[in-house]
Image (cartoon, rainbow, N blue to C red):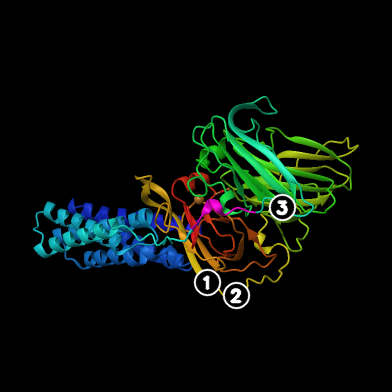
Amino acid sequence: MSLLIVLDLLVAVAAAAGWIGAGAAAAAGRRRLAIGLFAGAIAASLGRVGTVLALAGSGWWFVQEKVLVALPLLGVAGVVAVLAGRGPARVVWLLTAGYAAAAGLLVTVLVGYPVGWGEALVTVALVGTAALLTARATGRSAPTAAVAVVIAAGLIGAGLVVLPADEGVEHRADAVPVSSLRGPDTPAPGGEVHRLTLTAQTATVELGSGRRVDAWTYNGQLPGPAITARQGDLIEVTLRNADIETGVTVHWHGYDVPSAEDGVPDLTQPAVPPGGEHQYRFRADQVGSYWYHTHSVSHVGVRRGLYGTLVVLPRDSAPVGLDLTVPVHTFDGVTVVGDQDQPAEHRVEPGTPVRLRLVNTDSAPRRFALAGTPYRLVAVDGQDLHRPGELAQVGLRLAAGGRYDLAFPMPQTPVLLQVGGATWLRLLPTGFAGAVPEPATGDWPELDLLHYGEPAPVDLGGAFDREFTLVLDRGFALVDGVPAFAQTVNGQAFPPAQQVREGELVRMTLVNRSLETHPWHLHGHRMLVLSRDGQAPAGSPLWLDTVDVRPGEVWRIAFRAENPGLWMNHCHNLPHADQGMMLHLVYDGVAH
Ligand code: C2O
Ligand code: CU
């Protein structure tokens, strides 16, 4: 699919180059060259019709601007160029077809989906202007009517483009402030209170190999303190900021806390400035593997080290023999697993139940492989899978921000965890003294979560009350008032908020038109995967907080709006979010 997207761009370039080249050659009187380029241009133009038809199979979002603007423009100019007699008129029309092809390419690259009347008219005006100027240059006078049409199209189009869009979010007078949306202040019966202070501070941290990292930390350590609680406990965190100039917060990734505790600056709280302080409090009701991180200038803060893990164990379960949380991060291009930049080793009694909680705290997906034992992937993003089968010799691609829990009994032989093809964790049976093999896992096939585990009925409890579609792409847009080749959603950087009412069942379609992966993350809610490219999961139901939408993919998810508040809905490739790929999900009746 991403191949098709690239191919479409290539034929578009070839078509533009072919038409312009043919026009230039004809103008220069190089007849044979002109005929050759002309034939190439026609072939490439027909080729683009082919790639557009093929892309259309994935959905209208992939071709709308091509079908409505690029191909009609090129079609008209191309047909006239074919029909135009020899001589200067033909030169003008050949070149005009070239401008049309180039403009169509620009519309795809800069505007994308959805193209509106404004962009369409501006494109027509640009091609028209170029054609008229070309006609002048070849000594022909342009018809007044044509000039008038081009000017009118340009003016109307520009007007439509700059007209402010309707933000669509109503503010009710009786709205409750998000800061009032807090949870219980006591643990559930039998639970405990965990009190902890996180102090955000710059620190030079020495890793196992002696390498030093100039980091932004919670409590001077990388990662921040691991928080472990039991279901029903109350977690109370005091965040202090010692010296992080950009401000800090704590966001509980994947944990559906009450909105006031969600840690999003300028949405649920002000960022905590140096010298400042903020309290978080929530009940640990969800069991599983999570993490926390700053949400203030997060593309810098998280990368530099403002993150830690959050694990909530079931209330009354016996402790697992070996329960290891394995957060993976990249500092200055170097992989760091937990607090180590070199492989770690554990001695484990054979037969011991082992649970490995893999956490990807980077902005790009990571590939894991577990060698030396069959195992089960028992939970994804903190949610247990239904009847996960035994796995061996598969690669596990973990989305940015995502978590996988692996479980197995310790065998009599070594078990190795690889990250990106290198061993990072060695579990050695007690008493084992032999050599530890180093398996090559790079060509192990990748596990497809949509075909893992067994189906189980999920009762969503009714029909969808609301539909949202997010088309992810790059395009020309304003980022903080500055024109940029932004990361866009529906053609906009930082698009208007989505609005829901409490209790609604929402279906969201995520379409990736771009050539990059977008790990889509919704705060405060778990998303049930309905389909990927039209295929419903054939295995376990999948409840995710981060959906890894790869180039060309279309995912449908559902969530129940049952956590009132103001929420982020964004790409967890954090630089993408910073470049526009984020919006808000706003509950009716909740205000800042
Ligand atoms: Cu882990 Cu809004 O992010
Ligand atoms: Cu992204």
Q: Quick one: SS at disc 2?
A: loop
Most foreground residue, 474 or 217: 217
Q: CA distance from mark 3 to mark 2?
A: 28 Å
Amino acid marked by disc 1: Asp
Quarter of the image holding residue 505? bottom right
The residue under the point 83% across, 48% down is 319
Q: CA distance from mark 2 to mark 1?
A: 9 Å
N-term-proximal mark, 3 vs 2: 3
N-term-proximal mark, 1 vs 3: 3
The residue that label 3 is drawn on is: 288
The residue that label 1 is drawn on is: 465
Q: Quick one: SS at disc 1?
A: loop
Does 6 appear above or below 508?
above
On residue 462, the disc is 2
Q: Position of residue 225 (x, y in %)?
A: 68, 37
Q: Residues within 10 Å of mark 1 (few under 14, many from 20)?
A: few
Q: Residues within 10 Å of mark 2 (few under 14, many from 20)?
A: few
Q: Quick one: SS at disc 3?
A: strand
Most foreground residue, 583 or 434: 583
Apparent side of residue 215 relative to residue 34 in the rendered image (left or right): right
The residue under the point 31% across, 53% down is 17
The residue under the point 27% across, 58% down is 123
In the rendered picture of this protein, how many numbered marks are placed on residues?
Answer: 3
Q: Are marks 1 and 3 in contact (CB under 8 Å)?
A: no
Magenta region includes residue 42: no
Amino acid marked by disc 3: Gly
Q: Is residue 383 something one can see in this rendering? A: yes
Q: Is residue 214 something one can see in this rendering? A: no
Range shown magenta? 176-183
Quarter of the image holding residue 161? bottom left
